[in-house]
Amino acid sequence: MKTINNYNFNKKNVLLLVDFNVPVKNNIILDNIRIVKVIPTINKILNDKPNKIIVITHLGRPNGKKIKKLSLEIVSIELSKLLKKNVFFYKKDIMKFNDNELKKIKNKIILLENIRFYKEEKNKDIKLAIKLKKISDIFVNDAFAASHRDVCSNMIIPTLFKYKCIGYLMDKEIKDMEKIFNKPKKPILAIIGGGKVSTKIGLIKYITKYIDYLILGGCISYTFLKYQGYNIGNSCVDDKYVNTIPEIIKHCKKNNVKLFLPDDFIVCKKKKIKKVNYFNIPNNYSGVDIGEKSIKKFSKIILKSRTIFFNGPFGLIEVKKFSYGTLKIIKYIGMSSKKYKSYSVIGGGESLLTLKKYKHKNRISVISTGGGAMLYILKGKKFPFIKKKVII
Ligand code: 3PG
Ligand code: MG
C-alpha cells in the first residue's frame, strides 16, 4: 500500500478520511487521542502546501439521520486547538458541497459534518462518493479505528481515485498489530474484559490458536460464573451466550491455553459496597470491579508474559473507585514492558479512558486507537479495504 510519503500534496485538494469518533459527555470530549494521533498526517500534508484538506469522519451511530448531539462541531474546535490553526466546519449538507462552495472557504482545513448523517454512507451509495471526488484530487485513509466497517467512505470513495494512499496512523497501527502474529515473543497473554460478550466470543475462540494465557474479566467473567452455577446477583451477564462458555473451555483445553478468571470482586448495591469471593456474590448486588486477590493472581501472569494485549475494562470504570482493578492491570502491563521488554498492546475506548490515568503511558508499546478494529485484526481478519484491494 502507498503511504503519504509517496506523494507530494502541493496545490492539491486532499480528501482525508479519519476516525474522530471520540467519547463525548455533556458536550465535552473525554479523550482526544484519536484526534491527536492523526495530527502528524495532517502536518505532513500541510507542509507540502496543499490547496485544501477536506476531512471526513463520523461520530456515534446516527444511522442516516441528522442528530444534533452527534454534530462534529466540538471535534472541529478540538482539531483547531491541536493544530493551532483555524479549521472550517462545514455544517451544511455535504450533498450540496461543490467547487464554488470550496472556493469561498479561505481556511486550508475543512471538516465536513458527520458522514453518518447521510444514509449513503451505510448504503455504500456511489452518489456520495462522486460528490466528494468532484472536489478533490487525492484520497488519504487514516481512519484505522473504522477500517473494519464496510461503508462508502472506506470502500467506495477510494475506488474513484487514481491517487490514493494510507496515512501515518493507519500504516503504523497495521504494522503494530501484525507484530502480534509475526514471530511474537512467548508466552502470549490476552486480557479480555468489557461489556459486549457477543463481540468477544468469536475472538476468544480464534486467539486460543496462538496465545498461551487468557485472562477474562468484565461481563464475560460473570457469564462464566453463571454457567458454572454460581449466583452472580445483578452483575452484567449476556444470557444468550451462557451456552457458549463450554466452547471456550474446549478451545482453551485443545490449544493448551491456561485460562484465568477473577477470584474476588467488589460488588455494590446502591451506596452499599462489599468485597466478596466469586462464589459469594449476594442477590441484588452487582460486580463493579475485581478484588485484590484477583489483581495479585493476574499480576503474576502479566509479569510472566512477553506479548500482551488488553481490550475491555474489568470494572465500572466511569466511577473512579471502580476503575482501580483495571488501572492496576494496566500498571502491571507497563511494568512487564519496562522490566522484561514485553510487547504490550492496549486498545478499545474504555481501556483508553482508564489508561489516561496512568502516569507511565510510554511504557506501553502500543496504544491503539482501535477498539473493534483491533479485535478484527486479532481475529486474523484483513480489513475489507485491504482484502478488496481498494487502496494498493
Ligand atoms: C469505533 O469507535 O469502534 C469506530 O469509530 C467505528 O464505529 P462503529 O463501531 O460505530 O462502527
Ligand atoms: Mg465500535
Image: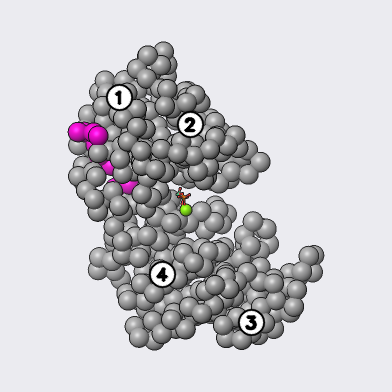
- Mark 3 packing: few (<14 Cα in 10 Å), some, or many (20+)? many
Percent position of residue 221, x then y: 56, 75
Percent position of residue 104, x then y: 41, 13
Tell me the SS state at disc 4. Answer: helix
Question: Residue drawn 47% across and 83% down?
Answer: 246
Q: CA distance from mark 1 to mark 3?
A: 60 Å
Q: Nearer the viewer, mark 2 or mark 1?
A: 1
- List the residue tagged with mark 3: 278
Inspect the image, locate mark 4, and give the three-letter code of the amino acid beneath it: Gly
Q: Is residue 148 above or below residue 43?
A: below
- List the residue tagged with mark 2: 113
Q: Is residue 68 above or below residue 372?
A: above
Magenta highlight on residue 188: no
- List the residue tagged with mark 4: 202
Question: Residue drawn 61% across and 65% down?
Answer: 315
Of the 4 image quadrants, the one containing the C terminus is: top left
Instruction: Kindly indicate whether the residue at mark 4 contacts the one at mark 1 (C-beta within 8 angstroms).
Output: no
Question: Where does the magenta region start and end?
Answer: 160-171
Q: Nearer the viewer, mark 3 or mark 4?
A: 4
Precedes in sequence: disc 1 or disc 4: 1
Inspect the image, locate mark 1, and give the three-letter code of the amino acid beneath it: Lys
Q: CA distance from mark 1 to mark 4?
A: 41 Å
Tell which of 276 and 159 is nearer to you.
Answer: 159
Q: CA distance from mark 2 to mark 3?
A: 47 Å
Precedes in sequence: disc 4 or disc 2: 2
Inspect the image, locate mark 2, and give the three-letter code of the amino acid beneath it: Glu
